[in-house]
Image (cartoon, rainbow, N blue to C red):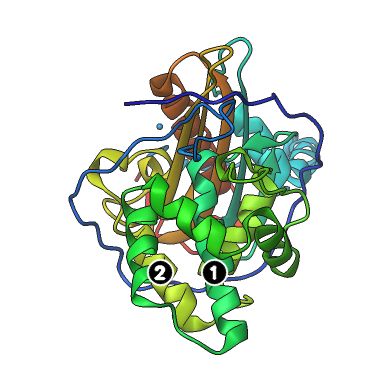
Amino acid sequence: MFLFATVTDPIGGLCRTRAAPGTRSPPYRRRRIRGTGDGTDQEKADARVRAHAVAGPYRRSRSVTPSASSSRSREASVEAAAEPSADPDALLGTAMKSVTVEDGADVAVAVLDMESGRSATHGRGTFGTASIVKVDILAALLLQAQDAGRHLSARERSYATVMIENSDNDSASALWTAIGQADGLDSANKRFGLTDTKGGDGGLWGLTRTTAADQLVLLQQVFGDDSRLSEGSRAYLQGLMGNIAEDQDWGVSAVADGSRWALKNGWLPRSTTGLWNVNSIGRVTADGRDCLVAALSNGNTTKAMGISLVEAAAQAAVSAFRDAAWFRDGVELGCDE
């Protein structure tokens, strides 16, 4: 059963390109269990928050040798075109032109190729997080535990498991309180390097605002080596994100090779308009390459439309990088011959 939330359409915020190399991870796992839904009526002060298509394998086209009379001019034109197309942001911007966005909806996406460390961001503005903030909540809790030189308690681990794997809202509320609500989240995010994410007021963790670029930074904290989180903390969070409930296997996982993904999704209907915020963040392996992807959207007429939008954005992001020589060099190329 969905409860509804009032969310003010956010504006502003600058998208940034960030790059930090990462490493490959152990195999992903999924446990086939059902999850709980997102959403709440945030206007009721006494209510706790219950917010919550990729191109095929690259094939090299057969080259054609230019005639002597035209080789010089063609060479010049190729050089002129190659420079902008090699820029990650330009590649992503071009790929996103093929993504259909409903009137009144908005989408932003950020992607990082973990082998090369190259990243790109498309789309401006801030978005309500809904349940993707649960990754941030657990990251903050793990950082606080590290500072205190302790392990998570059995109760904290129980809350963390169902919060991430099943997107359970009561568990998120308990851990939101444990970290000190928005103050605790914002403090941890400052150390993580997130600059445009602001925790929701009071108990309204689902109304935390963020950008695609900031979510990419958070994903690097979870999946990269250059992180404030210890190796054990990162492995713990990665494992939970790789065990997402079957009914929540959508979003960035649409890009992955089979089950090679780890993610967290969020979906939140607005009570004032009936429009949906739908988001997806995580790591996927596509064509044998690990990529971090964050796709955020708002103004969707239905949850299904939002899912289609973030999946199309994630697919565009990863397929855009397939066009870059630095990506292809690490992938086995097919030939027409």
| Residue 141: mark | 1
**Between 8 and 252, which is closer to the camera in this rendering?**
8
Dot 2, crowdedness within 10 Å: few (<14), some or many (≥20)? some
| Residue 101: mark | none
Label 2 vs label 1: CA separation? Answer: 9 Å
In the picture as drawn, the residue positioned furthest to the front comes out as 46
Q: Residue at x 43, y 49 (%)?
A: 264
**Figure quadrant of the N terminus:** top left
Q: Is residue 307 above or below residue 175?
A: above
Q: Position of residue 94 (x, y in %)?
A: 65, 31
Residue type at mark 2: give it: Glu
**Could you tell me if the residues under marks 2 and 1 are in contact, i.e. CB atoms within 8 Å?**
yes
Q: Is residue 71 above or below residue 1?
A: below
Q: Is residue 53 above or below residue 206?
A: above
Res. 157 visible in picture? yes
Q: Position of residue 254 (x, y in %)?
A: 37, 40
In the rendered image, which quarter is residue 66 located in?
Answer: top right
| Residue 156: mark | 2
**Between 250 and 260, which is closer to the camera in this rendering?**
250
